[in-house]
Amino acid sequence: MTDGFAETYGRAPDGVWRAPGRVNLIGEHTDYNDGFVLPFALSRGVSVAAARRDDGVIEVRSRQASTVVTAPVDGPPVVSEGWPSEHAWAAYPVGVARVLQEHGTGGASLLIDSDLPQGAGLSSSAALECATALALCDLHGVEIDRPALARLAQRAENEQVGMPCGLMDQSASLLCTAGHALMLDCRSELSSQVPFDPAAAELTLLVVDTRASHTLTGGEYGRRRAECEEAASLLGVDALRDVKDLAGALGSLRDPVLRRRVQHVVTENHRVEASVGLLRAGALSEFGAMLNASHLSLRDQFEVSWPEADVTVDVALRAGARGGRMIGGGFGGSVIVLTPAARAEKVRDAITAAYEKRAWTPPEFLDAIPSQGAHRLN
Ligand code: ADP
Ligand code: MG
């Protein structure tokens, strides 16, 4: 990657920064309801080789994109500029540069490379934002603590890219540590490290990319957020996190769709808290039941699952896995499966065979090892 930089820009980079993708163990569609999430960082991520520039310009290239984009760092929100679709990917790094320049950073030349699948629910977008953000801060000598940097990266995705995401992805990428998941309270934005080391318990956490791609900007995701807001307002609470009496809340809502949404969010928050308790107690295999309950709730109450995800979970359980669930916003992306390590191969084969039988694109597997958050490589 460093070699490629010199060929492209005619000079060595000042450094290389890397930020991981993440898997959210449990707590789906809870972040924008002021609730709890429990992500951990993957060993895979996005690397950014970068050189400082002092002309107020950011130039971005990616080994995973064919276009070169050069833009001033103090422009209007990228989303308002109407960039052509082949430049859309660059809204993430340029957006970060535009948000951070208000805090004292400036221009840079970037070469991006990644071993993280895009659009697979593993948060390549936040990895790209966070690696870029760390690079710009270091290059321009700007110190921003990590929780604050996560918020700025989130702001970039919200305001610059136009994607109304919560704070989880950027927090996971910047705050996670090896051998742990991160319990994040999305209201207080306080987080704590929760031990999570499946290998030590002779378990494997598989990430299955179902190869069904998602398009989350607007659409169903925005609709779910709006439904949650509407339900909260009908229930007279600031956010669904504040619903204490679920039965009472369900009884008072007339719209069956809103009832299902509330049921999911409230029970999912309880599942995160229960999961943290199990993990702190070292009861990792009991945690599988939480994954299963989460999947059913996402499928039946929140209605964001997709056929490949349902089949993956089903087949994995029948092949001896302890639990599994869809991850990410829904309608495509990945599934996680917790299985005894000794059965991992059997589970993988069973899933592959099930896809083959249905003539679906073969799934891809990733062993997820809880890894360190964003850092400077050299
Ligand atoms: P996810 O975050 O789940 O991977 P998103 O749709 O939020 O999915 O973000 C994916 C988008 O992020 C891609 O479509 C692309 O625009 C951008 N992106 C991620 N990684 C890279 C990369 N290595 N090079 C260029 N763009 C990237
Ligand atoms: Mg994303």
Image (cartoon, rainbow, N blue to C red):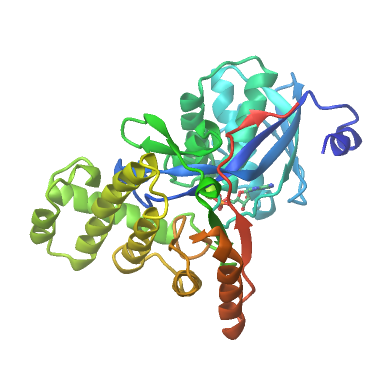
Q: Front-most of 282 and 266?
A: 282
Q: Residue at x 58, y 56 (%)?
A: 119
Point out the image quarter for the N terminus.
top right
Q: Front-most of 203 and 311?
A: 203
Q: Residue at x 41, y 55 (%)?
A: 285
Q: Residue at x 60, y 16 (%)?
A: 142
* Quarter location, residue 306: bottom left
Residue 135 in the image: x percent, y percent? 67, 27
Residue 350 in the image: x percent, y percent? 57, 75
Residue 257 in the image: x percent, y percent? 23, 65
Is 310 above or below relative to 119?
A: below
Question: In this rendering, would 290 be left or right of 119?
Answer: left
Q: Residue at x 49, y 45 (%)?
A: 162
Q: Front-most of 195 and 306?
A: 195
Residue 30 in the image: x percent, y percent? 34, 48
Is 166 above or below relative to 103?
A: below
Point out the image quarter for the C terminus.
top right
Q: Front-most of 2 and 234?
A: 2
Tell me if residue 73 can be seen.
no
Instruction: Give the total number of marks visible in the rendering.
Output: 0
Tell me if residue 88 can be seen.
yes
